[in-house]
Image: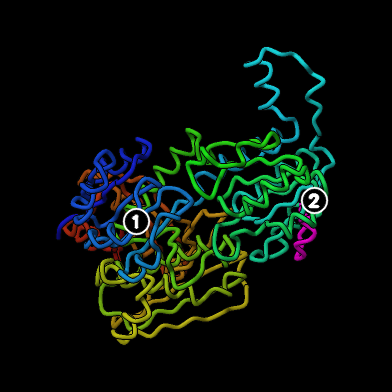
Amino acid sequence: MSKPTIVVCDHIHESGLEILKNTSDINYVYAADIDKTALLDVIKDATVAITRSSTDVDEKFLNAAVNLKAIIRAGVGYDNVDMDGCSSRGIIAMNVPTANTIAATELTMTHMLSCMRKIPYSHAQLKNDRIWKREDWYGQELYGKKLGVIGFGNIGHRVALRAKAFEMDVVTFDPYIPSTKATDLGIEYTTNFDDILACDIITIHTPKNQETLDMIGEKEIAKMKDGVILINCARGGLYNEDALYNNLKSGKIAMAGIDVFIKEPATDNKLLDLPNIIVTAHLGANTVESQYKIATQAANNAIESARGIGYPNALNLPIDETKIPSFVKPYLELTQKMAFTIAQMDKTDIKSIKVEAEGDISDYLDSLITFGAVGALTPAIGCEKINYVNASFVTKEKGIKLETIKKPNTSVYKNKVTIKITTSNGVNQISGTIFDEDNQRIIEINDYIVDVQPNGKMILFKNSDVPGVIGEVGKILGDNNINIADFRLGRNSKGALAVIIVDDNVDDEILDKLRNLDAANAVYFVQI
């Protein structure tokens, strides 16, 4: 089987390129320095493409990319990606939504402080004009002001927490989160948008879609208090730019801090003519740390996609990810990885796939089963033939039964997902949960309690619980130059299950040596 090919179409941080260069089971092509016409010849061989804003993933691009299975937009926005075109061709489109979270959060606070104290203008007067006039620059304090946060996702909630540190009163509006996500942090939650419009300062942190385009226009601004301050470091067009201009000019809006515009580059935007606006050139992700994280996450996600292991942050799923809580996404990825693991343990024909869920995640079983089906079928039929768009059709065609069960939460975990896969050989099951916001963990394999991150190469060694087994396993691996990175052991009345994380691939000859140990009951090698 030929190696999958990952093509990098635009410039990304060197850290991401190094990951791709050092991954032996893919072909890596760097095409960021060629013109976009020549790129069309290169992209025909791509299994996965990594792009940024310089490459339009349009009909011409997609028609040329005849072997493309996935595309990674290395950043948050994906306005330059033809999502319908990708879906119709079965191409999974993904972005990297959290890598610039801290950078965008801190830029928002920078704009907020700059608007309150007019820092850029006072700086220019002193540095460029060499005028010392302190009396020109009486500002306002954040302390005691009321901040309205529209959108309480990765960035919005971090802005709210930092505003609380400035001893501001903070209220948020986000119909797609449970109110407790805000109130547990001491943030007021409202379902009445007018509560946001009544604030001293308003900042917006939503995706750009039909629901949020021109979300703040003349009608909304008319309800705001005189002298309001508006911040937008999210997407251009969330504030209607004509309404923003008119009300900045009239003084209804005292100041605005704007990082994003409808049309970019925005060098001729009329907002730049106003004296009460602070602007930056779409710098939300422009930190060294952010660019490093964007590049490394994009590279790792591209590798996962090329291998068919997972499609992190997929955008064109049969579910609308903008309308599900952010805590759900890691569970979707975890479910796919758990199913992928089971499918490597037992490679016979699958009869049924069952997903059980406990806690709030059980409200999203329809999505979980889709991801589980993709993970379960990828080893058998390949990632080129199974994806989130066609999973239900493929399973129906193969006569595989899909089942979901919502269970009462009886475990110690807030949320828990279990996937069970039945083949002609029997049933295997794996359970998992998420720690913190996105720390994936496998917590149970076939009734053995474990604690394993679902990443990398691992040997699953089921054995009788007798002395000397670990030493025998270690000797076989050592004799064959297989380095053990971690060793996790689960025990119950039936025996023991060792999950051995290794640095290298383990071939069948070595696995057979392990299987021939007297205590061995079952041995599997899986790669996630």
Amino acid on which the number 2 mark rests in the picture: Cys
Describe the element under mark 2 as helix, strand or loop. loop
Numbered badge on residue 312 = none
Query: What is the total number of numbered labels drawn onto the structure image?
Result: 2
Question: According to the image, label 1 marks what residue?
Answer: 57
**Image quadrant for the C terminus?**
bottom left
Does 42 appear above or below 178?
A: above
Question: Can see residue 500?
Answer: no
Colouring rule applied to residues: rainbow
Name which residue lies at 70% across and 38% down: 112
Is 289 colored magenta in this rendering? Answer: no
Name which residue lies at 75% across and 65% down: 191
Q: Nearer the viewer, residue 437 or 129?
A: 129
Tell me which segment is drawn in magenta: 186-197
Measured as percent of width and height from the top left, residue 200 is found at 80, 46
Measured as percent of width and height from the top left, residue 313 is found at 45, 58
Q: Nearer the viewer, residue 327 or 255?
A: 255
Q: Nearer the viewer, residue 11 or 296?
A: 11
Measured as percent of width and height from the top left, residue 67 is found at 22, 62
**Image quadrant for the N terminus?**
bottom left
Question: According to the image, label 2 marks what residue?
Answer: 199
Measured as percent of width and height from the top left, residue 393 is found at 34, 81
Would you call the spot at circle 2 few (<14 residues within 10 Å), some (14-19), or many (20 or more)?
A: many
The picture quadrant where one finds residue 415 is bottom right
Real-space CA distance between mark 1 and mark 2, rounded to the nearest whole angstrom? 40 Å
